Image (cartoon, coloured by chain):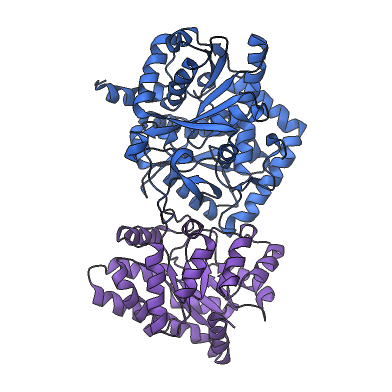
Amino acid sequence: MSAIAQRFQKLKRYNEVALIGYVTAGDPDPVYTPKIAEALIKGGVDILELGLPFSDPIADGPTIQAASVRALNAGTKPKTVLQLAREIRSNYNVPLVVMTYYNPVFRMGLDNFFQLAKECLVDGVIIPDLPLEEAADYKKAARDFGIDTIFLVAPSTSDARIQKIVAATSGFLYVVSHFGVTGTKSTVEKSTLRLIKRISPFTAGRVPLAVGFGISQPEHVKRVVAAGADAVVVGSAFVSIIEKQQQNFKEMLSEIEETAKILKDATQSKAL
Amino acid sequence: MKKLCRYPLNGKYGKYGGRFVPEVLMEAITELEESYKVAKQDTRFKSDLAYYLREYVGRPTPLYFAENLTKVAGGAKIYLKREDLAHGGAHKINNTIGQALLAKRMGKTRVIAETGAGQHGVATAMACAALGLKAEVYMGAEDTERQKLNVFRMKLLNAQVHPVETGSKTLKDAINEAFRDWVTNIETTYYLIGSVVGPHPYPMMVRDFQSVIGKELKKQFREKEGRLPDALVACVGGGSNAMGTFYPFEDDADVKLFGVEAAGQGIQTGKHAASLGEGAEGVFHGMLTYVLQDNEGQIQSTHSISAGLDYPGVGPEHSFLKTLNRANYVSATDKEAAEAFLVLSQAEGILPALESAHAIAYAMKLAKTMQKDQAVVVTLSGRGDKDVHTMADYLGVKI
């Protein structure tokens, strides 16, 4: 059983929902990333998601686009990110997933990428521009190295496709909450809650269901948890803190930890 | 191996092409593919398209024997396929009218597009105005600056222009923004891609709409010379005019195909846009193809005097033709293109688009190496009015 699966099993025993925290590795500079990860973990993040920056992130909104630019300008390379993952993962027993676009992985070569990812203790990979139909070689390479492949479903995904994607995903299923790119929103749409209810029967007993895109407030977390999500992914909310506090690292860390703590508390609403 | 004209097979040209897009788009792209498949066989759609190409676009465009240019080059006969005479001044309208008819058929009310030089944006705005659709065009902020005339033309045509301030602020960033808009507004919006790029079925669909160029050319050349041409030359950015020119000749092995990329300030300077010549296989904008990228797979910014060739990727079918050695991909520098612009203007009284001037530059070199009884056809993809400011800068003239 993978570390991600074990983590969900453990949370389930306490009737808890997982908080997955995303930051772009190397933002604003690779030297900061381990401390930022530590702040997220101290705040209560159950799974850490590290973005491996790409020059043309078409699924991301302005906040993560800007983070990618900062990280790339600071010289962050795919290997830098994987080495950061190893440093973080060897210090904390928190599953770590890498999120990136397909080209950096393709360029490195699938086997090379997954071999290095394995050596760097990466537990899972998310690639938003690699749909199931193009993913056969990717899935095989990941399986060879025992790394989870986390696929995404969207509001437009038909029930027939959901079934296929659930069969292919491992670790968890990433449900994109609404039509659009990543970024904070003021509310959770009713359509998101309906979407969770539509997808849950396909994931129940098979794989945890995580909801991301636009989740930034404790209220959002409570609503998707109530609708039946097993995990929430929060990204842009953390990345905006990094952006805002670039010049004040201490403040940045405490704010990240505090935000993570508030969001984690909201995930525990299910237990009440 | 199957005849080349049978490709794509399952959305792929050999290993190139495919559909590398976020899950949000998958159902919409499948719906688009189905709608196109049905429309292509539909008598009404075919007659509507033929009607607009004839009555609105002004087709067929002439195949002109450039006698003076032939003398200047001193070798094979040079013919020009005059896409500059199509409505709007470029080949782009062949595709936009086809896709706009499809968008309407699919019940979409809002059309988005990206544009580099502005030619595709203008052609989208025209087709949408003619068919009663709302057009919004993404254009890199750097391109809105160097192609002000086209920005204003789009506005006059009632299209909304969104300058894109991210990344290199050129065509690739405009495509990124168009994708982000599309994932957000997928239910109402049709994404009208302007070249043979993007996820399947776009490279196939745009090629099919543009292949009217090659089909007409084949017939016209036969009427004039009673045979097939010896070589075809077209410029390649994304590669739509070249693909439209080449496609009806892909299985005519005696016809040599030449795609001319932008060598910018010179290949050795690194400031160019020669994706096929200098790039490596990669996945970008929904397709597996040749891409200009660094060793880590980050997409590189490109340079060309012509905004329309300033793109780090290329249509996947070109990558396929390159790998098979069916087409030759060469390049022309900014300087060669600007010189060719002047030569054609002065020899034939035709101002070519700077994009097309790359093809003219190479065709003259090629013709020189061939016999006088041979013939080269160059696709003159657009007219050069939009480039007079760039030419004035190049010549150091203030206008």
Relative to A89, is B398 above or below? Answer: above
- In the image, taking residue A117 as reference, residue B50 lies left or right, namely right
Figure label count: 0
Nearest the viewer among B205 and B88 is B205
Q: Position of residue B207 (x, y in %)?
A: 61, 34
Where the N terminus of chain A falls, by quadrant? bottom right
Residue B206 visible in rendering: yes
Taking A228 as reference, is A232 left or right? Answer: left
Instruction: Quadrant for residue A80, please give it.
Output: bottom left
In the depicted structure, whether residue A49 falls above or below residue B144: below
Which quarter of the figure has residue A32? Answer: bottom left
Residue at 47%, 54% in the rendered image: A58
**Residue sitting nearer the eye, A117 or A231:** A117
Give residue B204's position: percent from left, percent from top.
63, 39
Residue B27, image x, y percentages: 65, 55
Q: Nearer the viewer, residue B167 or B153?
A: B167
Tell me what residue is drawn at x 60 percent, y 59 percent: A131
Relative vertical location of residue A7 with respect to residue B245 in this rendering, above or below: below
**Residue A191, image x, y percentages:** 59, 66
Tell me, what hue is chain B?
A: blue
Image colour for chain A is: purple
Q: Is residue B214 above or below residue A60?
A: above
Question: What residue lies at 30% left-to-right and 65% top-to-bottom?
Answer: A28
Q: Residue furthest left?
A: A247
* Res A188 visible: no
Q: Quadrant of residue A149?
A: bottom right
Q: Residue at x 56, y 59 (%)?
A: A130
